[in-house]
Image (cartoon, rainbow, N blue to C red):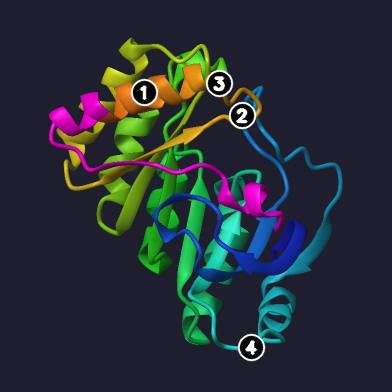
Amino acid sequence: MIKGKIAEIFESIQGEGIYLGEKQIFVRFFGCNLDCWYCDTKLDYFIEYDSEELIQELLLYPDNYHSVSFTGGEPLLQKRFLKEVLQLCRQHGFRNYLETNGTMPEALQEVVDWIDFIAMDVKLSSSCGHTDLWHLHYKFLEIASSKETFVKAVICDNTTVEDMRRAINLIRDINIGVVLVLQPNLQEFSLKLEDKLNWFKAIAEDSGITTCIIPQVHKLVGVR
């Protein structure tokens, strides 16, 4: 049986994006294919589970949750294990919520049938330092659009309007109905960054895209 590397399992509220405040069970996968400088999830430990062991742990929680959030790290790095867990979750009546950096479209294609909600990052190169991810984001959003999906972009002091326009074009080209969430990098938050967020929001809305500015609220209120 396939084993998965899991850093932690816990219950909390969703602190990011359009499902802000929803009660979820979080399953944090170990490992990521990116290393964004602003990342706040530096993992150095994990426990190995097989899919049956993991589902038995999830069943210990009450049933009044919006969904199970598979987060990371990057869950799609462990796509075979993830697929088994998603299928078991469906069998037990859970709804599956995937948090992902949006760079592994082939892996998403293998598991998308068992996902209900997708929170997809768009990694702006001027924000995160990674380049040449746009072709992966295009393919990823094409696949993700078959599910209830929103797109999140972290905005930093260095984020350029050119990158913002590329993210806007991505959504316009693939699925203009997708909500765009602008997430301020709280490590740099200032009035200057607030002005940039409002400027970017106006540009996106002028392009016909529903756009929200939503910080990492769980950090502001002191929950996990």
Q: Which residue is mark 3?
A: 128
Residue in the image at 32% along x and 11% along y: 162
Tell whether position 111 is magenta.
Answer: no
How many residues crowd around disc 1 within 10 Å: few (fewer than 14), some, or many (20 or more)? Answer: some
Mark 4 vs mark 2, foreground winner is: 4
Q: 178 left or right of 53? A: left
Question: Which label's residue is closer to the chain start, 2 or 3?
Answer: 2
Q: Nearer the viewer, mark 1 or mark 3?
A: 3
Task: Tell me which numbered mark, 4 or 2, is placed earlier along the sequence.
Answer: 2
32 or 10, nearer to the observer: 10
In the picture of the structure, the residue carrying the numbered disc 1 is 134
Give the x, y percent position of residue 157.
52, 15
Other residues around mark 2 within 10 Å, as few (<14) / some (14–19) / many (≥20) = some
Give the number of the disc on residue 34: 2
> Mark 4 highlights which residue?
62
Dot 4 alpha-carbon crowd within 10 angstroms: few under 14, some 14 to 19, many 20 or more: few
User: Please, what is the three-letter code of the amino acid marked with disc 2?
Assistant: Leu
Give the residue type that dot 3 points to. Answer: Cys
The total number of labels drawn is 4
Pointer 4 or 3: first along the chain: 4
